[in-house]
Image: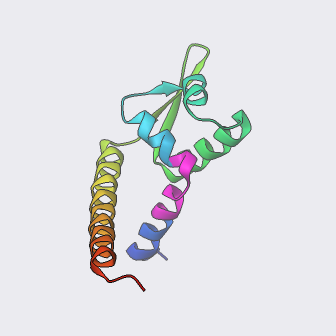
Amino acid sequence: MSVPLYQAKAELFRTLGHPVRIRVLELLQHGPRPVRDLLDEIDVEASNLSQQLAVLRRAGVVTSYRDGSLVMYALSTTDVADLLAVGRRILGSLLSDREGLLDGLRAQSESEPPA
């Protein structure tokens, strides 16, 4: 029995719903990176990074391979980078809407007479 598409999408977003995983994906947008470089860029213990990479690998979002003694990680598809870009645009839109609301509230409170 196959999983409904909405359930598969929800699982993908749950996989992406961790700050370390998002940071890894952001770093991998620029090309494959060895684990040691990821560790240098992300302030987590090696064991934590390893766990998060395993989650991303199991979900098929990243791939890994050996390059000599280095374990390299890469995005499995450029669509992951596209998804991150769309996420940034959505977040930017949401935050700019909130900033507009905040500006409106400030203007309103400045025009009210003191109590």
Residue 20 among those drawn in magenta: yes
- Residue drawn 53% across the image and 47% down it: 21
Image quarter (top left, top right, bottom left or bottom right) of the C terminus:
bottom left
Point out the stretch of residues depicted in magenta.
Answer: 12-21
- Residue drawn 28% across the image and 48% down it: 82
- In this view, the residue in front, 13 or 87, is 87
Left or right: 34 with respect to 99? right
**Magenta-drawn stretch, dominant element (helix, strand or loop):** helix
- In this view, the residue in front, 44 or 62, is 44
Residue at far bottom of view: 115
Percent position (x, y) of residue 59? 52, 53
- In this view, the residue in front, 109 or 87, is 109
Residue 28 seen in the current view: yes
- Residue drawn 31% across the image and 73% down it: 110
Residue 111 among those drawn in magenta: no
Taking 42 as reference, is 58 above or below it?
A: below
- Residue drawn 30% across the image and 72% down it: 101
Percent position (x, y) of residue 23? 49, 42
